[in-house]
Amino acid sequence: MSDLDKAIAQLRACRPIPESQVRELCYKARELLIEEGNVVSVDAPVTICGDIHGQFHDLMELFRVGGDVPDTNYLFMGDFVDRGFYSLESFLLLLCLKVRYPDRITLIRGNHESRQITTVYGFYDECIRKYGSANVWRYCCEVFDYLALGALILGATTDLAPTSSISLEESTQSTLPADDDDIESEVLDSQGRVQCKTIRTPPLRDPPTNSTSNGHISPAPDRDALSPPAERPPSSSLPNASSPTLGSTPQPSTSQQSSSSFPIHPPSSTGSILCVHGGLSPLIDTVDKIRLLDRKQEVPHEGAMCDLLWSDPDDIEGWGLSPRGAGYLFGSDIVTHFNRKNDLSLIARAHQLVMEGYKEMFERQIVTVWSAPNYCYRCGNVAAILEIGEDGANGGVVGRSNGDVGRRYGLGEEQVPHSSLPPPGRRYRVFEAAPQDSRGMPAKKPVAEYFL
Ligand SMILES: [Mn+2]
């Protein structure tokens, strides 16, 4: 057993490793991370995780629910430390796994991976408490400076592979859909039982000349929508070419099915998925501009790098001031424009507590994933991870998503089709906090009055 494997075993038992080993680990991690770009390319399949915040036992629960490294390919979107009592063990374990299996785990930076923030919210104190000096905190902060700012998931599929472990007696559905290709997203509990599904509505595959402003249509709200005619979008959102078939008189389903505008099977590949801790920045309109930033520094108080780690989506138009005092609020119009310009089908981000563990916004163009159940040991929320499947038919085609989409049409941005890309198939696994007896929890600490 190598030293690294020993360290992994020790950290899995929630026991800190000696300072000299931390130093060596952080040195190796930095050597690895320095080679990564600001935006790491990750191939599907991959499981996307949100904030961990030092909740070590819940991180173990996450691995139990989502599969272990290296069997499962993971992408963690930052905020590994602070708030919880085991920031050190959580971060060092993830770092060990990164060094041991560099291609199976991706770590990107959260706003808490910062000297200033960790000094206030717990990680610094924890290091002092566990090592008697700030050395380990300093080693970790040096690694923070090298973490990537984002990731781009390529080769995602729109189709969800059938859930293997459906418990029939638990499923309230008497008949499963004949074709699993129809499922756009589903939510599983920690035992792998399907809690709910969203059926994919027929995609509006607009030709480039079509001027429909929005290709997105709301998912059918329930399982009654399994028969295709029931899930027709309202006629107002249909492309003009198709609207004559949707007069006030209902059409026979056969004629709708055979309409060439609505292929029975949606395309299996989708645009890329941008993963970032916080959100977008008014200074960044292409993924390529993220690549140009100088990231190897403490998180600045303002500017593009700060915004990527601090911003939040909100029900506003355009940009707004963030109540956090750093980053911005951004509305659905910003996301729609950014996703279209960059060939993205989804933005996945973390950073905000969501009671249900995940939250899709803006017609599924952005999702918040939160992976710290019962946050701060008192919020009562569940956590989620998001599994993105691989498009088996991709055949090595690499999505660019580099902001050069206009080049394909020769005339710049004006030629970008106005239809949005279909969102990838999304499988959420929702889980609760690890059982109390699995953790040796210190006495309750006072909780800060607001959450970063
Ligand atoms: Mn955060």
Image: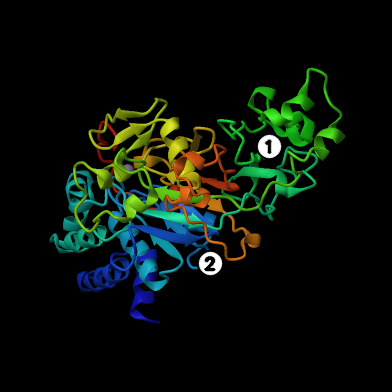
Apparent side of residue 331 relative to residue 237 in the rendered image (left or right): left
Cα separation between marks 1 and 2: 32 Å
Residue type for callout 2: Asp
Please report the residue visible at 65 percent of the width from the left and 51 percent of the height from the top: 160
Sequence-earlier tag: 1 or 2: 2
Residue holding disc 1 = 201
| 369 w.r.t. 139: above or below | above
Ligand 1 shows up in the quarter that is top left
Residue in the foreground of this view, choosing between 15 and 136 = 136
Residue holding disc 2 = 71
| 125 w.r.t. 72: above or below | above
Q: Disc 1 on helix, strand or loop?
A: loop
Q: Nearer the viewer, mark 1 or mark 2?
A: 1
Residue type for callout 1: Thr
Decide if residue 211 is in sight here: yes
Residue in the foreground of this view, choosing between 165 and 347 = 347
Apparent side of residue 39 relative to residue 178 in the rendered image (left or right): left
| 416 w.r.t. 26: above or below | above
Residue 259 rendering spot, x and y as whole percentages:
79, 37
In the rendered structure, find residue 114 and report the number of the disc placed on it. none
Count of numbered circles in the view: 2
Please identify the quarter of the rendering in which residue 102 is found: bottom left
